[in-house]
Image (spheres, grey):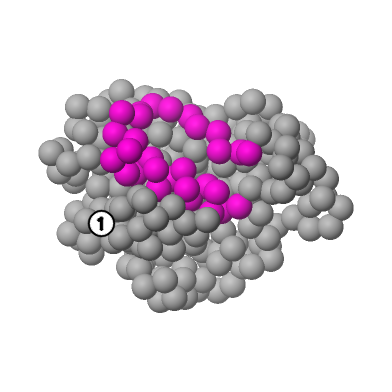
Amino acid sequence: MNNNSINLNEKKILITGVSRPLGIGATLAKRFAEAGATVAIHGYSDYDLIVGHKSAAKNNTEKLAKQLGVTLITPSDLEIAGNAEKVVTEAAEELNGLDGLILNHAYGVNDEIGSWTEKHINSHLLVNVTASMMMIQAFANQVDNSKDNAITTFTSGQYKHIETNIMAYSVSKDATICLTRGAAKLLGDKNIRVNCIDPGPNDTGYCFGEDYETIAKMFPSGRWGTPDDTADLALFLHSSYAKWITGQVIASNGGCKCEF
């Protein structure tokens, strides 16, 4: 369902983690563009291919940018030092400034104890925490403080129940909440609001069969959440309706009884 009452005309927004047609990032880009925002997207399709997402394909971010009519920011691996700042700088140059930043990118793979390595842990922290911090800093350095500026981060249900088979991911997503609250304090005087979304399980084409039905039953409504559900909240947070909301972690999870 599209919320046509939200108008984001003149907003200039960078959305990261846009690399799969069925993903939250692609839906965010589509919905924000439909709401009138000028949108730039960044993604890294090679990661999806490595972890084996069903809808993964080479150059997906480039294809989505063309399909959605939004600005493509040079795809890059956010694990590599310096790339995060380059993404924000390029987006600000392409759009002639930014007033919105949506940090939807994430790195996450299974890691049972006994298989932990420094490289494995650091890959999660570099993408999910370090890159986000550097992007927030770069974004704050270029904003017009006279405007209403907003940043949205994404966490997962690990702050309620840690999934021990994905410990590095869980730790990084809990750190995202700390980053959100700290950045909100640091950037309030720059007219930058910072909030965090917990979208709950979203049907992005990664779960099937009996597992899919089991998770659906965990929602009071009997259905999974969708990227459109998540986009509704993100649109609100970047609109004037949310001008007095900052430093918050908001669960848009349909009342799911799941612990992830």
Q: Nearer the viewer, residue 84 or 189?
A: 189
Q: Is residue 91 visible?
A: no
Q: Does the rendering let one see residue 4?
A: yes
Q: Is residue 70 magenta?
A: no
Looking at the image, residue 147 sits to the left or right of residue 220; the answer is: left
Vertical relation: 34 (above or below) 163:
below
Q: In screen coordinates, is 35 left or right of 30?
A: left
Reading the image, the residue beneath label 1 is: 9
Q: Position of residue 147 (x, y in %)?
A: 17, 41
Write down the region rendered in magenta.
226-254
In the image: residue 102, left or right of residue 190: right
Quarter of the figure with residue 62: bottom left
Tell me, yes or no, whether the highlighted magenta stretch contains residue 250.
yes
In terms of depth relative to the viewer, which is nearer, 169 or 183?
Answer: 183
At label 1, which amino acid type do we have? Asn
Question: Which image quarter: residue 179?
Answer: top left
The residue at the point 69 percent across, 36 percent down is 256
Residue drawn where x is 59% and y is 72% of the image: 57
What kind of element bears circle 1? loop
Residue that appears at 43% across and 27% down = 248
Q: Position of residue 226 (x, y in %)?
A: 61, 52
Q: Position of residue 16 (x, y in %)?
A: 42, 54
Please report the residue visible at 32 percent of the width from the left and 68 percent of the height from the top: 71
Q: In what quadrant of the picture does the C terminus appear?
A: top right
